[in-house]
Image (cartoon, grey):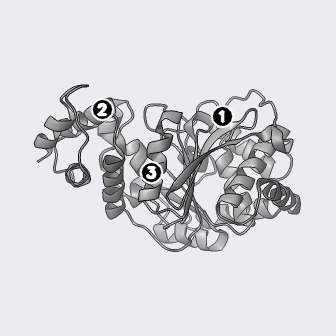
């Protein structure tokens, strides 16, 4: 079957056509069930990349990924869907922000893997390793217990969705983006009603907004963020799309409007430096640029989930929480819970 579908998507720039949802389901099932050969899988990924995936094709791959994944209704909050290929030149604001907004009563789901192409950057997986936590080895029950205790769920995606691990070698050999770079971010491991999703190019806003609608998120924020992540810039405005009730609208979020615009200092972005800055921010001692970036991202995410009525209220709420030390306490508690299995990196 995959051969027939390849003939449709790999006819070249003028001859290739988008697959119907049903056809794309067939392709996704063949690939994630490993019924297609490595050559066929690689050819399909390249052909789709050249053609550009349609909304129906992306939705089909998300659906099949979800079918293969362990998903829980443990907490229904905000899913932070950033790129699995990581960061190379920016602060991982979303990690610190997770503990800030959880302290405000909004559960957060984070997920990721070891680094992938095309960026090969630092990932959340690397940050946890720096903390002595190998999430791939932590039992699922321990991860769920940590989420119950703190409201922060971190999912090692290749363990909770095994086909992603089985397809890693092909993706590494290709060294380029594939349909999985988008689909893996939308598996929605905790059935979250709210989504914040990072994109690199504004040309995909419309497709991602339609995809978020099709996947029935209550409300989503599509962010053309830092290095294609879900993190808003703090040194300049960020283009975003708000998606709700089948409608989408452009919103430019300008940190200057809230007195937060700040120049980002240079840094050597190793996992150790990421953790050092994260912990400084959560303890109220970080550089003002990184504190402001976490405050702005926290405020916008609280507003998306209806925890505050405005970004201004969200900033005030987040500042107060940092002053109380509650986010730092949650961060410390989460680390302890994730280490409760006795597994550590030596």
- For image coordinates 26% across by 41% down, the residue present is 18
Note whether residue 286 is visible. Answer: no
Measure the C-alpha gap from mark 3 to mark 2. Answer: 18 Å
Point out the frontmost of discs 2 and 1.
2
Mark on residue 210?
Answer: 3
Q: Position of residue 297 (x, y in %)?
A: 71, 49
- For image coordinates 47% across by 38% down, the residue present is 204
Q: Quadrant of residue 219?
A: bottom right
Location of mark 1 (residue): 90
Decide: few, some or many residues near mark 2? Use Cα within 10 Å; few <14, some 14-19, many ≥20. Answer: some
Position above or below: 141 against 322: below
Q: Quick one: 206 or 147, which is closer to the camera?
A: 206
Decide: few, some or many residues near mark 3? Use Cα within 10 Å; few <14, some 14-19, many ≥20. Answer: some
The earlier-in-sequence mark between 2 and 1 is 2
Decide: few, some or many residues near mark 1? Use Cα within 10 Å; few <14, some 14-19, many ≥20. Answer: some
- For image coordinates 35% across by 53% down, the residue present is 59
Location of mark 2 (residue): 51
Point out the frontmost of discs 3 and 2.
3
């Amino acid at each position: 079957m995959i051969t027939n579908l390849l003939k449709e998507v790999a006819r070249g720039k003028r001859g290739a056509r988008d697959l119907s949802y049903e056809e794309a389901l067939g392709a996704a099932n063949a690939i994630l069930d490993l019924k297609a050969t490595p050559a066929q899988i690689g050819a399909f990924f390249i052909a789709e990349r050249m053609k550009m995936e349609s909304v129906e094709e992306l939705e089909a791959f998300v659906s099949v990924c979800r079918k293969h994944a362990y998903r829980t209704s443990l907490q229904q909050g905000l899913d932070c869907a950033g790129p699995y290929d990581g960061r190379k030149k920016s602060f991982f604001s979303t990690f610190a922000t997770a503990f800030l907004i959880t302290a405000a009563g909004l559960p957060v789901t984070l997920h990721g893997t070891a680094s992938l192409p095309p960026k090969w950057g630092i990932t959340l997986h690397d940050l946890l390793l720096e903390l002595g936590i190998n999430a791939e080895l932590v039992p699922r029950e321990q991860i769920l217990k940590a989420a119950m205790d703190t409201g922060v769920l971190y999912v090692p995606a290749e363990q909770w969705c095994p086909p992603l691990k089985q397809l890693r070698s092909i993706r590494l050999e290709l060294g380029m983006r594939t349909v999985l770079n988008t689909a893996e971010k939308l598996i929605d491991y905790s059935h979250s009603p709210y989504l914040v999703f990072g994109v690199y190019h504004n040309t995909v806003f419309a497709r991602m907004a339609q995809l978020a609608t099709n996947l029935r998120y209550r409300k989503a924020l599509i962010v053309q963020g830092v290095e294609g992540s879900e993190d808003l810039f703090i040194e300049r405005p960020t283009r975003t799309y708000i998606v709700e009730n089948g409608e989408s609208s452009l919103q430019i979020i300008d940190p200057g409007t809230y007195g937060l615009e700040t120049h980002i200092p240079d840094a050597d972005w190793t996992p150790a430096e990421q953790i050092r800055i994260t912990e400084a921010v959560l303890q109220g001692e970080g550089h003002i640029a990184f504190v402001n970036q976490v405050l702005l991202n926290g405020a916008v995410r609280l507003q998306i989930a209806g925890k505050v009525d405005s970004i201004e209220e969200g900033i005030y709420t987040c500042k107060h929480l940092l002053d109380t030390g509650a986010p730092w306490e949650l961060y410390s508690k989460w680390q302890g819970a994730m280490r409760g299995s006795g597994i550590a990196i030596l």
